[in-house]
Image (cartoon, coloured by chain):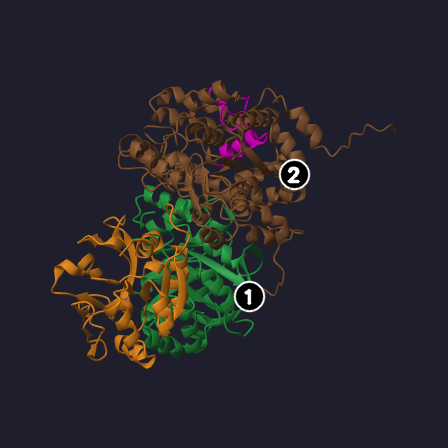
């Protein structure tokens, strides 16, 4: 055994990137032009996390969509939800905690609970650290219009930056702090205010159909956190990965003990398991009634600009996914449209080039993390999922920056603007 | 996640007679919603609303240990007298039977009209070890929501045979069909280890804890 | 029905989970308790957990850390590291192991394999063999965490291990482990062909297709991986999905 007494810091080996290229020829013989199998109905590639294909070559996400439409009694589900709500109405300081990013989905939950069910809710937000100005406007408008109480927690920049770099290297995803913070915060708020009912939004069943399905529902609990949310990394793990960080610093990303939640009688559910989700329709209603607005999003076809308006880094995040898996958010949204019969597979194929873009926000991210683009690409390519091999020639540089890019360049530059005369 | 219920958690005692992976069982029961004690004391059996009898090892050793720790009478009082629901797991299920020939002929608790028989070593690998699927035979609250074909983890050399098919809740197959889950009145048994069987096991334990039995 | 078993291998050192490369350099990969929670949520079929410095430090396995992990896992666990006596085996079984791993002690005292199998049942005893290739002399068995050569040829030792009563063998290619360069199919095939007890193939998985190749080219029935889960975004659920797509029978998610 090694005589070393200290672990070495993690760096990607470069092995996966090299071997993926070596394997590329072999994969091409198996399936399709790039060797990547796709669903016969929608465009999802086999590189997605939980995709499987049936004997006809149709994916399990399409099967989940069919289950949603044909096998679920949504009236019965709605009644079930009503029954749950009545058990908690008026009994606690708030009727429910609502995890609230302020994006379309959580805005929809808040709107439904307040306007349709007349509940007194507490909105619980984890500040995802790169929240865009228009998004903050949306939050102001929605929260005021609905008349809700609202708590927000912001974690410190030092820790976030360190964990971003570490999770980028280990998982090819720098959003660990946000995945975990967004889930940990409402549970803590629930314990703090002693409110047992927590109502989440869309269960993501059709995006990640292999973890759960509509029949089983997606219970937002500790198992879900570890199975689907946290990239298989908990705060206690991260503490051994990064230097100069103690558990107190990582506590914003740590679930409270599930025992404590059970002793409070926690009931944690997804609204989308009881009321059928319809993204375009929800946007229309939110826009008309609350003034919730779309925004330009990088790497996303404009028809979907009600999705993912919250985070300035969204484009880079999606670009990473493109390098790893060979597809990203535009195709993912188009797949939902295909399954809903709103778009044909051919029409969706026309949109693929939106995913294959190098977003302008990448420059800001690289600067913020202190790495250059070669290193970024090396890390990303070391996370390619077989049999996908990234082809840089397919990628076009974005033609424009988002309106708020200059703001972020100023904020993250480290320059200290001063009003005081020098 | 569970549906709304009273915050008071169901009281479960896991019988400690020195055999079996008590901590695994207890921890999983706790996750499934129970308030758990691991104990051999009569007081804790009386406190409990549900009793779990785990077990790993040989039948005669298990019965001897139950005797030695003076658990036989308290258990009889709880199960036969107060009709508390009891779940026997693996060897714990075998102990529910009237008799087993393992090592030497030994009487069990006799709560289930059944006896243990060995798998045939001449024609198959014994013990039966690994994941295997069950088929539901008779309705039982423990198996609500557990579909046919669900996987559970088995490790055993003997299987339970009853001449009363209505007691057999579910079977599995190893060379031949055999009893995987049995119920007689307030006494339940699983030949597999629910605490080793991931989500199907969790569902079964949660049913045992949450449902009115 | 027989399925291919997908088995993560996790290793403990000084109270943290770590991952070595060729048994040498290592990186921190997490905390035993939280990693237990993670793997429990992933529908794995079983899992191997090794305290890899117990033998070298001449002590019993770190029961406290093992228990932290085992408590979170509702799945069959195979636990080892420093297993030298039946008392140690008994203790491991008490804290959550369903099977135990014997490695160095099996070489030092081969009769221990038989003693353990007789006391606890052969289905409970997995003998782990670490092998390294030396030019001119084929694969040699190493013990003490790959630190000491034994002069034993791997196939001969595997046969001996089976003769002595082991229920399973785990074979690890030291040159491949942690490198993510792919399994050593020659080594695995040679061991599998030599014995009739199940063989867990370990060491080198990096791309998803490595497992497919292993299964298709060696008829492996138990495939282990470590780095694949720890350093890529591929979870056990993803690996099973991939194998399912490749028409390999796996226990469904």
**Residue nearer the viewer, A365 or C65:** C65
Q: Tag 2's secondary structure?
A: helix
Q: Position of residue A235 (x, y in %)?
A: 56, 50
The disc at residue A1 is 1
Question: What SS does tag 1 mark?
Answer: loop
Quarter occupied by residue A376: top right
Callouts 1 and 2 in the same chain? yes
Question: From where the camera sits, is residue A193 visible?
Answer: yes
Q: Colour of chain A?
A: brown
- Circle 2 packing at 10 Å, graded few (<14), some (14-19), many (20+), is few
Q: Position of residue C192 (x, y in %)?
A: 34, 61
Q: Residue at x 23, y 78 (%)?
A: B103
Q: Which residues are magenta?
A: A295-324
- Taking the image as shown, residue A81 lies to the left or right of residue C25, namely left
Question: Horizontal and vertical percent for residue B55?
Answer: 32, 69
Disc 2 marks which residue? A369
- Tell me, what hue is chain B? orange
């Amino acid at each position: 055994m090694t005589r070393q007494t200290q672990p070495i810091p993690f760096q990607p080996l470069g092995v996966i990137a090299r071997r993926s290229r070596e394997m590329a020829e072999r994969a091409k013989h198996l399936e399709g032009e790039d060797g990547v199998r796709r669903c016969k109905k929608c465009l999802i590639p086999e590189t997605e996390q939980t995709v499987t294909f049936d004997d006809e070559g149709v994916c399990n996400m399409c099967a989940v969509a069919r289950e949603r439409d044909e096998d679920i009694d949504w009236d019965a589900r709605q009644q079930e939800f009503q029954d749950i709500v009545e058990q908690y109405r008026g009994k606690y300081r708030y009727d429910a905690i609502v995890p609230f990013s302020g994006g379309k989905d959580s805005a929809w939950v808040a709107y439904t609970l307040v306007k349709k069910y007349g509940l007194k809710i507490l909105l619980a937000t984890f500040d995802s650290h790169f929240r865009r100005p228009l998004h903050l406007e949306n939050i102001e408008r929605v929260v005021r219009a609905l008349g809700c109480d609202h708590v927000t927690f912001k974690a410190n920049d030092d820790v976030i930056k360190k964990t971003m770099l570490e999770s980028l290297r280990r998982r090819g995803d720098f959003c660990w702090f946000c995945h975990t913070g967004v889930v940990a915060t409402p549970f803590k708020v629930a314990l703090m205010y002693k409110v047992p009912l927590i109502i989440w939004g869309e269960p993501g069943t059709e995006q990640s159909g292999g973890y759960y399905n509509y029949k089983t529902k997606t219970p937002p609990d500790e198992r879900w956190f570890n199975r689907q949310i946290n990239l298989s990394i908990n705060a206690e793990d991260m503490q051994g990965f990064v230097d100069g960080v103690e558990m107190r610093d990582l506590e914003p990303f740590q679930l409270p003990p599930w025992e404590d939640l059970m002793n409070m009688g926690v009931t944690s559910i997804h609204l989308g398991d009881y009321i059928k989700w319809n993204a375009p329709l929800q946007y229309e209603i939110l826009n008309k009634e609350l003034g919730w607005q779309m925004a330009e999003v990088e790497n996303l076809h404009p028809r979907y600009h009600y999705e993912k308006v919250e985070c300035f880094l969204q484009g880079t995040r999606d670009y990473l996914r493109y390098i790893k898996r060979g597809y990203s958010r535009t195709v993912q949204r188009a797949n939902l449209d295909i399954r809903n019969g709103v778009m044909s597979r051919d029409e969706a194929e026309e949109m693929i080039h939106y995913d294959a873009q190098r977003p302008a926000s990448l420059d800001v991210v690289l600067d913020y993390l202190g790495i250059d683009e070669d290193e970024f690409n090396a890390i990303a390519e070391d996370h390619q999922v077989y049999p996908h091999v990234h082809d840089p020639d397919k990628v076009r540089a974005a033609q424009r920056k988002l309106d708020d890019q200059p703001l972020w360049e100023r904020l993250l530059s480290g320059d200290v603007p001063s009003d005081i005369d020098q | 996640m569970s549906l709304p219920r009273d915050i008071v958690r169901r009281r479960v005692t896991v019988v400690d007679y020195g055999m079996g992976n008590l901590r695994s069982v207890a921890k999983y029961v706790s996750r499934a919603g129970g308030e758990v004690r691991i104990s051999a004391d009569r007081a804790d059996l009386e406190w409990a609303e549900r009793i779990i009898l785990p077990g790993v090892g040989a039948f005669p050793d298990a019965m001897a240990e139950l005797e030695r720790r003076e658990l036989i009478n308290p258990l009889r009082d709880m199960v036969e007298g107060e009709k508390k629901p009891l779940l026997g797991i693996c060897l714990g299920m075998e102990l529910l039977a009237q008799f087993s020939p393992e090592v030497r002929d030994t009487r069990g608790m006799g709560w289930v009209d059944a006896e243990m028989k060995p798998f045939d070593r001449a024609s198959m690998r014994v013990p039966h070890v690994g994941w295997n699927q069950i088929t539901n035979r008779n309705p039982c609250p423990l198996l609500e929501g557990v579909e046919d074909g669900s996987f559970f983890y088995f490790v055993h050399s003997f299987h339970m045979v009853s001449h009363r098919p209505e007691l057999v809740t579910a079977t599995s197959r190893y060379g031949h069909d055999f009893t995987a889950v049995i119920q007689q009145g307030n006494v339940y048994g699983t030949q597999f280890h629910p605490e080793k069987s991931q989500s199907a096991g969790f569902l079964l334990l949660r049913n045992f804890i949450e449902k009115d039995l | 029905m027989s399925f291919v078993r997908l088995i993560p291998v996790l290793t403990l050192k000084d109270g943290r989970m770590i991952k070595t490369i060729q048994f040498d350099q290592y990186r921190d990969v997490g905390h035993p308790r939280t990693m237990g929670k993670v793997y429990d949520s992933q529908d794995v079929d079983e899992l191997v957990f090794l305290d890899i410095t117990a033998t070298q430090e001449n002590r019993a396995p770190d029961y406290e850390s093992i228990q932290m992990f085992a408590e979170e896992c509702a799945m069959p666990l195979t636990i080892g590291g420093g297993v030298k006596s039946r008392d140690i085996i008994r203790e491991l079984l008490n804290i959550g192991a369903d099977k135990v791993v014997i490695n160095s002690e099996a070489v030092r005292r081969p009769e221990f394999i038989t003693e353990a199998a007789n006391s606890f049942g052969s289905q409970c005893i997995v003998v782990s063999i670490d092998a390294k290739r030396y030019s001119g002399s084929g694969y040699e068995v190493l013990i003490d965490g790959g630190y000491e050569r034994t002069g034993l040829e791997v196939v001969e030792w595997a046969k001996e291990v089976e003769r002595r009563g082991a229920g399973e063998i785990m074979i690890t290619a030291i040159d491949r482990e942690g490198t993510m360069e792919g399994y050593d199919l020659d080594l695995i095939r040679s061991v599998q062909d030599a014995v009739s007890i199940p063989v867990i193939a370990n060491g080198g998985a990096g791309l998803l297709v490595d497992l497919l190749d292993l299964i298709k080219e060696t008829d492996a029935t138990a495939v282990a991986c470590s780095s694949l889960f720890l350093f890529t975004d591929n979870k056990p659920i993803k690996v099973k999905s991939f194998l399912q797509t490749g028409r390999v029978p796996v226990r469904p998610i």
